[in-house]
Amino acid sequence: MPLAILQARMSSTRLPGKVLADLAGKPMILRQIERLKRATRLQRIVVATSDQASDDPLAVCLIAAGVEVFRGSLDDVLARYIGAIETFGPTRTVVRLTADCPLADPDLIDQTLALHERSGADYTSNTPARRSFPKGLDVEVFESVALKIAADETSDPYDHEHVTPFLYRHPNRFKIEGLEQAADEGDVRWTVDRPDDLDFVRAVYDGLYAANPTFTSDDVRAFVRGRPDLAALGGDRRV
């Protein structure tokens, strides 16, 4: 069963501290983890954050909530992933997630993992050349041995910051797969990077969570279609 590593930090450039922002009465990252736990193919969820003092409040929050935490380099996120894999492994397959996605879709995570397993790929994502799912539902799956090759061979700062580019930039060395849907939602924005993004997900949670804590992506779509004030909040397409 795969290991999910959720990368998180407090020092976001555009919205500092967003991972601990209140979302329906809990920190946003804990709401996201609630959703991740519904993915049936995930064995374990670990948060990988930095070893900087700025991330101490995040680590304290997570540990108090019973979430496993790995702390490593702030800027070398690739090394942070390798450290988390070595600490919480051994594991063959790893799922990379980011903590700005409180509308994460557990079914989509399972679908991406199923494709990865079925195809025997080294790297699989639902953000291939044609992005078809909303921003904020991103899933990357890779083999830990492939990521170790990347860490050993690349000196490109971009690879070390973004973790996986070495893999999908070398399709001659790694088997790459991508999950797409028929609908064109690639420019739909559900991620949280700006204050208006946080306003959007708070409105979604306020409208759906109390009645149904396990609301789905289709529930989000239907809710936003009924709220014209949210459909283009911040100037971005939201449904």
Image (cartoon, helix red, strand yellow):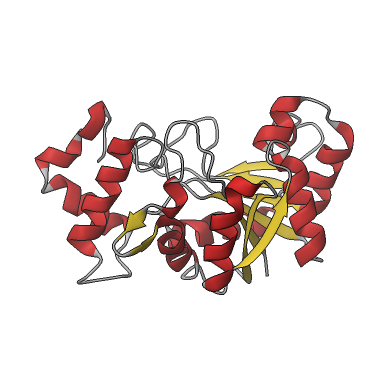
Which is nearer the eye, 121 or 25?
25
Q: Can residue 175 be seen in the rendering of this structure?
A: no
The quarter in which the C terminus is drawn is: top left
Which is nearer the eye, 140 or 63?
63
Q: Position of residue 76 (x, y in %)?
A: 73, 37
Q: Position of residue 202 (x, y in %)?
A: 26, 52
Q: Is residue 204 above or below residue 151?
A: below
Q: Can residue 51 be seen in the rendering of this structure?
A: yes
The quarter in which the N terminus is drawn is: bottom right
Q: Position of residue 218 (x, y in %)?
A: 28, 56
Q: Is residue 183 above or below residue 92?
A: above
Which is nearer the eye, 92 or 59?
59
State the image quarter where residue 92 is shown.
Answer: bottom right
Which is nearer the eye, 164 or 60?
60
Left or right of 221, for residue 19? right
Q: Residue at x 21, y 34 (%)?
A: 233
Q: Residue at x 26, y 33 (%)?
A: 237
Left or right of 159, for residue 111? left
Total marks in image: 0
Q: Is residue 75 above or below residue 45?
A: above
Q: Position of residue 8 (x, y in %)?
A: 56, 49
Which residue is outermost to the front?
A: 53
Q: Residue at x 63, y 72 (%)?
A: 43
